[in-house]
Amino acid sequence: MLSTGTYSVKTIRSFSGGPFPRRGGPCIFASRPPLKVLVHSTHDSRVDVSEPVAAAEEKQRQLEASEQPSDIIAGVTKKKRSSRQADSTDAVATFLTRRFGIAGGLAWLGFLAIGTLGEQIKTRLEVANEINGTKDVQDAPEVVLPSGVRYRDLRVGGGQTPIKGYLAVVDYIGTADGVEFESTRARGKPIVFLYGSRPFTGGMCPGLEEALAGMRAGGRRLVTVPPEMGFGERGFVLRATEHVPNKQGIIPPGATLVYDVELVRVSIPPS
């Protein structure tokens, strides 16, 4: 069965042998269009014309026309921007630098420097007030708290009072029924702890924490703690730690505790 088809000039020129119709004219070939067509020439060669050449060339021109240089540049720029990272870990500094240039970054740096300087001035003022406001007292009256804890001021501090969650540094000598069980002053290592946190550090107890509540940094008190506000009927044994390997002491059950305690410093814990 013979059928006809239309071919371009390129296709016609590729044929050899015998006259061929002009461009756009009918051509006789043995095939089933639009499947692959094998045309026999006088040189016994085969030409694959499975897809019209004109249609393929037109499709290629459309693809090339659709890819404009601006689209290619935009695509490359987008990839570069997506892989770019912030120049600084400080988001504010990065934003100001990109928005206002180097002047914005320098302004933010100056703001941070002023803030740091302000904190240093504040700390020095607090230390100065603590020193100037601290004074020794004699024959101070003994104060008895509702819990049974008793204390007497030996020195009134001029610094900050303890606040829950703040760091407190205390230096004390503790005795249980007249026998010393711990002395941070002797070993030269005050106790540093978060005020109001649990469990207690070293020989600290609820009664001593309650007595520290009204103290100011730089102050010193003689605190007497009844057994129920101390370690009760269980007692306590101080054991060595990594930082204080020579720590040791025994608090007998039901012992009354006496602390000669000094509140050295109160400060905000580091974030």
Image: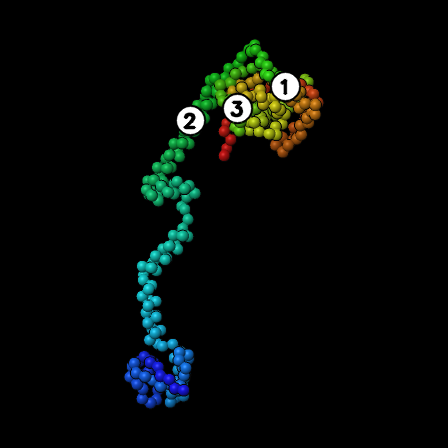
Instruction: Give the residue number, with chain letter if any, for mark 1.
Output: 225
**Callout 3 secondary element:** loop
Instruction: Give the residue number, with chain letter if any, for mark 3.
Output: 162
Image side of residue 221 versus residue 23, left or right: right
**Residue 62 in the image: x percent, y percent?**
33, 68
| Sooner in the amino-acid sequence: mark 1 or mark 2 | 2
Please name whichever residue, 232 or 58, is drawn nearer the observer in this view of the structure. 58
Above or below, 174 relative to 85: above
Q: CA distance from mark 3 to mark 1?
A: 19 Å
| Sooner in the amino-acid sequence: mark 3 or mark 1 | 3
Residue at position x 41%, y 79% in the image: 35
Label 3 with label 1: CB-CB less than 8 Å: no
| Three-letter amino acid code of the residue under disc 1 | Val
Instruction: Give the residue number, with chain letter if any, for mark 2.
Output: 121
Residue at position x 40%, y 50% in the image: 84
Above or below, 229 relative to 73: above
Quadrant of res 43: bottom left
Label disc, if present, on residue 39 of the rendered structure: none
**Callout 1 secondary element:** strand
Q: Residues within 10 Å of mark 1 (few under 14, many from 20)?
A: many
**Callout 2 secondary element:** helix
**Residue 144 in the image: x percent, y percent?**
59, 14
| Three-letter amino acid code of the residue under disc 3 | Pro
The residue lying furthest to the front in this view is 1
Residue at position x 56%, y 15% in the image: 153
